[in-house]
Every structure is written in C-alpha cells, then in structure tokens.
C-alpha cells in the first residue's frame, strides 16, 4: 500500500505569497500520477512537501494511513529522482547504486541481490563497473532510477527526470519508466510541464495552475471533457480553438454553422471549443487561409474569421490551399465543447 493523502494543506512563502490554500486530494495506491502544469503552478512544491523537503503552514500529508507531516524525509520510505542525476562522479555505477543501502546498513549480500535485480530490470548489468563520465545521458538517468529502485520504497517521486535529455532519448526513457512502473507495481508521482509525457505515461493526471487544481482525472477525460478553458487549451497540440459568440434564441452562429447551445444556459454569450481534428474544410467564404504547416501525413491549416480570430484545422487530406483563399468549415460528429462566457467553466 502506498496511497498518498493531501488533507487541507496550506503553503505560503510569505504573507503575500500563498502557493496552496486548503489543498485536498488523494493519490491512489499503485497508480502512476502525473502532476502537470506551467512553471510556477506549484507542482514541484507539492512533490517536495510529500518528500519532506518543504514545510507547510497547516494541514496533513499521509502515506497510507500514517501522518508523515512531521517526519524527516528518510523516515517516509520514499525514493526521489531529480532532474539532475546527482551521481557521485568518483564512484562506479555499482557503487552509486550501493551507497544509499550502505548508509542504511543493509547487509552486503542483500545489497548485491538488490543491485543485481535492479540492474537487470534497467539494462545496467553491463555498465556496473563504469563511471558516470563514461555513460550517456540516458544511461545516467537509468542509474538514478536504479539507485531509487534498490531502496524498495513504498513510493517513488520523480521531478522532471527527463527534461535534460534530447527529444529522441526522452521518448525512449518514457517507455522505460512506464515498463518499470508496470513491473514493480508501486505508486509513482511524476512532475512535468510536458503534456505529452503526462498523456502517455500517467494513469491519472493532476493539472494545476497557480496552486489550484484545474482537473484531476484519467488522461482521456482531460482531453475529451476538459473542465474549463485552461484545461482545454493546455492539453492537446495544437491547442483547442476557442471562439466567443453571442447567444440568440438558444442558438449561436459559428461561421456558416448554426448550433443549439446547451439546454438551460443563461448567458448572452458563450465560448465554443473545437479541436483541430474535429473540423473539416468545406466550400464557403467565411474564413481566410493564413498559412499551412506540412507535417508529412497531415497538415495544419491556419484560418482567420472576419473578427480576426484564429482557427486551426487538422487536415489529413492535405488539401491544396493558398494564403488568402476563402473557405468554409464543417464539424465532424458535432464534437463541440461549451464553456461559460463569464467563468470559463465547462457547461
């Protein structure tokens, strides 16, 4: 068991700078939780509070049913992997993985067995005699993971561990971390600002902004049913098109398309959200082509309406279009997201 409970936690750095106010949530046992959000949203602060590296003003943090709020980091039975690998340059891979076990006075035979198992899982068994300077970035990150793995903790905390790697290596390491999670069956809490990492790795995503929970759910829900405009535009690339239109007699006009607003909506304007892949180019004069981006198997078409609002269309047909050309749009399967004009919340 390694459930984590955040119970009415408030954290501030000064009288004028409050990060969290009465934050409450639960990270279930044996899940891969991704804490996602822009810089400064509080995601690393939350991770560090769970680890015991940051104090907080009030509230409780529990691991399983144990209140760890006043425990030192080494008493919490956790392992943490940081953005920088923090390997000892004068020690071999084996010695780096062994060091923490030695400090905890784990017997030599057990140390050797744990390192053997971890190195086989992570593909480090041929690298145990090498020094960090002899390793690639991906190999160093695997050593950092191995050092955490040999501790056999209840809980793994990972703070942007792939951000120092190039794009190709990040993809490879994403896969390796997912496979590690599936093999060991332990709770992992992973911080990133990268929505692709979040969507491909997490069993659940906690999306935060300015210390507030925007949405906490499985990845599919954040994409298909975003809770508000922030979520809608943070998840997905290109970001969701959002246009604001007046409501007249329960209907809105979107270019050449007339739509019924959700029943019971009272506002005189409403935000319409449309994913780029849910739009298709059609005959018409409602939009002007700005430019296109060729992505090989598809293209992105950038349009402007008469009010100057940009609309992006994902076009799998790679329709031949010229800048300045006038076009219309159709909706595929009427996949429409509605948001309150005042609050930005999902209708």
Image (cartoon, rainbow, N blue to C red):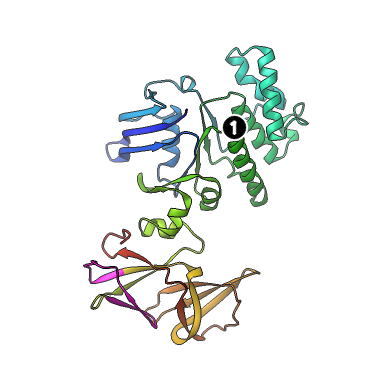
Relative depth, front residue between 83 and 246:
246
Question: Residue drawn 64% across and 30% down?
Answer: 146
Q: Is residue 193 magenta?
A: no
Which of the 4 image quadrants contains residue 88? top right
Instruction: Classify residue 54 as left or right of residue 119.
Output: left
Against 147, residue 276 (above or below) is: below
Residue 333 locus on image (x, y percent): 45, 71
Against 148, residue 190 (above or below) is: below
Instruction: Classify residue 79 as left or right of residue 142.
Output: left
Q: Is residue 28 visible?
A: yes
Residue 76 locus on image (x, y percent): 46, 23
Against 213, residue 95 (above or below) is: above
Question: Quick one: SS at disc 1?
Answer: helix
Question: Residue drawn 41% across and 20% down?
Answer: 71
Q: Among all residues in the image, which is located at the extreme left?
A: 266
Relative depth, front residue between 84 and 305:
305
Q: Which residue is mark 1?
A: 184
Instruction: Classify residue 185 as left or right of residue 10.
Output: right
Relative depth, front residue between 326 and 152:
152
Residue 11 locus on image (x, y percent): 33, 35
Number of marks in the rendered image: 1
Question: Residue drawn 49% across and 59% down?
Answer: 236
Relative depth, front residue between 201 and 90:
201
Circle 1 Cα neighbour tier, 10 Å, few/some/many (<14 / 14–19 / ≥20)? few
Question: Residue drawn 59% across and 15% down?
Answer: 103
Residue 272 locus on image (x, y percent): 36, 69
Q: For the magenta stretch, what is the residue range?
A: 251-270
Q: Is residue 91 visible?
A: no
Quarter of the image containing the C terminus?
bottom left
């Amino acid at each position: 068991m390694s459930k984590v409970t955040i119970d009415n936690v408030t954290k501030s750095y000064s009288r004028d700078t409050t990060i969290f106010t009465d934050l409450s949530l639960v990270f279930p046992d044996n899940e891969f939780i991704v804490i996602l959000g822009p810089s400064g949203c509080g995601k690393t602060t939350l991770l560090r509070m769970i680890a015991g590296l940051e104090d907080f003003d009030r509230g409780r943090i529990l691991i399983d049913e144990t209140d760890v709020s006043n425990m030192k980091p080494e008493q919490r039975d956790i392992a943490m992997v940081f953005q920088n690998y923090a390997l000892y340059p004068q020690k071999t891979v084996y010695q780096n993985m062994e060091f923490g076990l030695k400090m905890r006075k784990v017997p030599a035979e057990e140390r050797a067995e744990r390192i053997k198992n971890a190195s086989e899982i992570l593909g480090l068994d041929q690298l145990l005699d090498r020094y960090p300077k002899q390793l690639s970035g991906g190999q160093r990150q695997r050593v950092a993971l191995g050092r955490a793995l040999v501790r056999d903790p209840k809980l793994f905390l990972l703070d942007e561990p792939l951000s120092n790697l190039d794009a190709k290596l990040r993809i490879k390491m994403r896969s390796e971390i997912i496979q590690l999670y599936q093999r060991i069956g332990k709770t992992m809490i992973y911080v990133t600002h990268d929505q692709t990492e979040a969507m491909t790795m997490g069993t659940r995503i906690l999306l935060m902004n300015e210390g507030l929970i925007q949405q906490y759910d499985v990845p599919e829900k954040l994409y298909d049913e975003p809770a508000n405009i922030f979520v809608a535009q943070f998840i997905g690339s290109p970001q969701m098109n959002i246009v604001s239109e007046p409501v007249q007699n329960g209907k809105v006009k979107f270019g050449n398309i007339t739509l019924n607003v959700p029943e019971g909506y009272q506002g005189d304007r409403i935000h319409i959200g449309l994913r780029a892949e849910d739009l298709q180019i059609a005959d018409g004069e409602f939009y002007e082509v700005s430019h296109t981006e060729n992505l090989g198997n598809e293209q992105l078409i950038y349009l402007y309406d008469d009010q100057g609002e940009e609309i992006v269309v994902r076009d799998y047909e790679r329709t031949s279009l010229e800048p300045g050309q006038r076009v219309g749009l159709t909706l595929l399967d009427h996949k429409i997201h509605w948001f309150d004009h005042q609050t930005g919340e999902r209708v």
